[in-house]
Image (cartoon, helix red, strand yellow):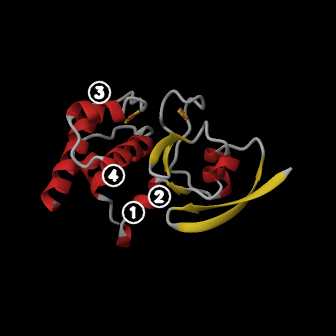
Amino acid sequence: MKTEISFILNGSEVKVAVDGHLRLIDVLRRTMGLTGTKEACGEGECGACTVIVDGKAVNSCLYPAHEIEGKSVITIEGLHVPKHKLSKIQQAFVDHGAIQCGFCTPGMIMSAKALLDSNPNPSDEEIREALQGNLCRCTGYVQIVEAVKRVARQLKGKQ
Ligand code: FES
Ligand code: FES
């Protein structure tokens, strides 16, 4: 049986009918066509499917779709700034070589964003801790941490 749910997706209110077994990632990728969010393990182990729900990074492969009612979801598609430019954090990943195959990247960026939104001046340890649920098979993580540190420096410059 389908239930209608409404939530805020990348700043706009949406309503969708969902089957009870659907996960948030299914709604995002299949129903809404937002394929930037990736699925790899499907078991909460890799972080590829990370999105932000009410300010917190969550694994959308484990998140029951019906629990999203009334909440705010941000996906990688929600980061674009006007005129199709990359956001600061996306640009930092590009500039620091923090992307290779790119499969982990949307989830990695959403975890980094959740961290920087709540703690704009994180230590290296805090960055690594925030990204520990996001696995990358390509980069070795050093460039990823450097990219997040650059955005933190940019945020600090603004304060
Ligand atoms: S696909 Fe969700 S944690 Fe791996
Ligand atoms: S860039 Fe390939 S898995 Fe991270």
Question: Closer to the camera: disc 4 or disc 3?
Answer: 4
Question: Closer to the camera: disc 1 or disc 4?
Answer: 4
Q: Which residue is mark 1?
A: 80
Label 2 vs label 4: CA separation?
17 Å
- Please name the amino acid that badge 2 sits on: Glu
Secondary structure state at the residue bearing disc 4 = helix
Q: Position of residue 32 (x, y in %)?
A: 63, 58
- Per the rendering, the mark at residue 117 is 4
Q: Which residue is mark 3?
A: 140
Label 4 vs label 3: CA separation?
24 Å
- Please name the amino acid that badge 1 sits on: His
Label 3 vs label 1: CA separation?
26 Å
Secondary structure state at the residue bearing disc 1 = loop
* For residue 33, above or below residue 41: below
- Please name the amino acid that badge 3 sits on: Gly
* Nearer the observer, 62 or 119: 119
Residue at the limit of the structure toward the left, as seen here: 157
Q: Is residue 11 left or right of residue 141?
A: right
Q: Which residue is mark 2?
A: 77
Secondary structure state at the residue bearing disc 2 = helix
Based on the displayed image, in which of its 4 quarters is residue 96 positioned? top left
Label 2 vs label 1: CA separation?
6 Å
Label 3: few (<14), some (14–19) or many (≥20) C-alpha neighbours in 10 Å: few
Q: Earlier in the sequence, mark 1 or mark 4?
A: 1
